[in-house]
Structure formats: C-alpha cells, structure tokens
Image (cartoon, rainbow, N blue to C red):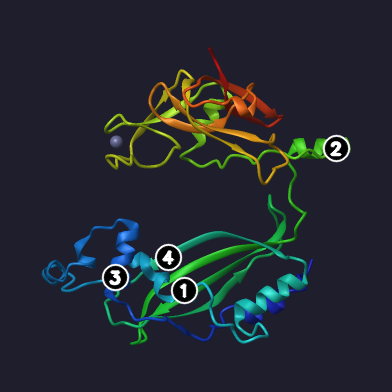
Amino acid sequence: MTDPLREKFDAICGLESTPEFARDAVNQAMIRHWCDAMNDRNPVYTDPEFAAASEQGGIVAPPTMLQAWTMRGLRPPKRPAGGTEPLGQVMMLLEDAGYTSVVATNCRQEYHRYLRPGELLSHSSYVESVSDEKQTGLGIGRFVTQIMVFRSDQGDEVARMVFRILKFKPGTGRKSPAAAEQEEEGEVKAQRPRPSMTDDTRFFWEGVDEGRLLIQRCSGCGRLRHPPGPACPACHCLEWETQEASGRGHVYSFVRFHHPQLPAFESPNPIVLVELEEGTRLVSNLLGVEPGKIEIGMLVQVEFSQVDPELRLPLFRPIS
Ligand SMILES: [Zn+2]
C-alpha cells in the first residue's frame, strides 16, 4: 500500500530550520543558580581558582545546562505564522491527517565539548524521520524524530539532541480488557489511575500482587526508603534489597480531600500518610472509618484491596 504522505515527509526531512540564538551568553550567574538548584558542588563550575588549576583551565558550564541557555522562556515571542519551519510543516501535515494527539517518547543529548562563559549558543533543528503508521498502545500514530543542533558563535557544533514524539489519532489505542468488558456491558466505570511501573518500582507492585508490602532498603547503609528510587538519599549507594513490612503502622498525618471530586475515588477522599513500624512512610487511603473520625496516631494495618479487576492497592484499616 502506498503512503499518501511519504513523499511530502521525504521532501521536508533533513531541511534545517533558521538558527535561534540564546537570550544570554553562557554566564557565571546562571551556572551558579543551576548548580544550587541541582545540588552540583563540582567547583570547576563555580570556583575560578580551582577551575584555573584544573585540566579545564577555567570555569566551564555543566553540559546538562544545554537547554537552559537556549530555551525560549515562559512567554516567548511569537514565531512567524504559517508553520514555515520544517517541524511545523510536518506537524501541520500530521494534524490534517487526524494525528492530533502528541506524546514525547525519547530525548537523548550528546555533548561534544564544554561551554565557557561568554559563548553565545544558537540552535537549529531538522526532522530526521517520520515513521510509517504504527499501532501503539496509545493509538494509531507516527513517530517523528527531530534533531536539534547546538552551535557556538564560532559556528562549531557543541552538542546535539535527539527528540522523538508520537503523533497519534485519539481514541484509537488499545483498551484494557476490563474497560473493553465494561463497554460491552454498556457500563463505563471510572477507574483509578494505574501506578507508573518502572524498573525501580516494579518490585513494589509485584509484592502487592502477592499480598506483601515490600520496602526498599539500602545495601550500603541499611536505610529504608519509600517511594522507591534508584539511589539512597543518605549514602548515594545504588545497591538495594527489599524488606517485607509487617503492614502495621500509625497515621502520621492525613487530609480529607474534598475538591475537586475525582470519579474513581470516594468523596471526601481520606488520604493518609502512614508511618510503618519499620520506620518509613507511605501515602495511602484509609478504609472503614468515617472521614471525620480519622486521627493522627491511629493504629492501622495494611489491607490489599482489589479496587478493580486489574488493580490491587495496599490500603490501610484502623486496628484497635
Ligand atoms: Zn544508604
């Protein structure tokens, strides 16, 4: 089958946009604020004496600041109308063909060298490829891969970024089996949002499915932590194991959430911060108590609750 858009995409791919210049040259003040915000204490970014004696021979900017120099700000000036830039042209073709929804799927940056104070960056972009139509979980769509090229005022390329999005037709995605079943029965019940599943959090949800409350424990210093994450905030160790919690704890804090009302949740929604007896805390819902009767210090026990056919959650219930 021939692709009616293929020829048009091919004509645009590879065309570079007009360069846009950074609003400010690379400067110490922005570097300092960035390092504060990111808690990056490397003195080669902020200490002129240290930097002069280092192999860099002077202050350099953190490479990951790349887009801090070139982003257009919260209220950028309007671009010229008409979608004349290559990416704009591809977007218009896709929107006209019904691919009106968008989600970003990948971003990868490559740094060729460090930037130094005084350098004025510019960036331009081109569309590298537009995929054939694919069925994805979100819907029928096409992946658009854009390359952004960053150059110094000398014209040399200092970095590049690959940015991929999926433009898709809304309502054409795969439904969950439970949603499809409900639709067949003519009833559509709102469902709680699904937990985000990553390599860091999978153990937790697999534990919940087995009726076990698993807490991440640092292999370096033994500290428990929740929500799960890749590194220990205390000793920065990347190794970890799990400990099965008893599920007993107490209400450390709570809110009764009145507004806005969310269809899949009861209202007011009793949200509790439970301190487990092992010593870490997690956010959950409280079962079996009137919202007005929740108290700080209340003893609670986990209950693995099947809130819909596909979702089991560790909720809590008061115990005497
Ligand atoms: Zn640790």
Residue on which disc 4 sits = 109
Residue on which disc 1 sits = 71
Which amino acid, mark 1? Answer: Met
Look at the numbered discs 1 and 2 and tell me whether their residues touch, using CB distance below 8 Å.
Answer: no
Q: Is residue 27 left or right of residue 106?
A: left
Look at the numbered discs 3 and 1 and tell me whether their residues touch, using CB distance below 8 Å.
Answer: no
Which residue is at the front of the view, 164 or 317?
317
Element type at mark 4: strand
Question: How far apart, in angstroms, are the residues tagged by discs 4 and 3?
Answer: 15 Å
Which amino acid, mark 4? Answer: Gln
Residue mark closest to the camera, 2 vs 4:
2
User: Few, some or many C-alpha atoms within 10 Å of disc 2 (few <14, some 14-19, many ≥20)?
Assistant: few
Element type at mark 1: loop
- Dot label at residue 187: 2
Residue on which disc 3 sits = 61
Which amino acid, mark 2? Answer: Glu
Residue 178 x/y as whole percent = 76, 35
Which amino acid, mark 3? Answer: Ala
User: Few, some or many C-alpha atoms within 10 Å of disc 1 (few <14, some 14-19, many ≥20)?
Assistant: some
Which residue is at the front of the view, 60 or 302?
302
Q: Is residue 114 visible?
A: no
Which residue is at the front of the view, 299 or 47?
299
Which image quadrant for residue 194?
A: top right
Residue 317 x/y as whole percent = 58, 20
Q: Residue at x 61, y 76 (%)?
A: 87
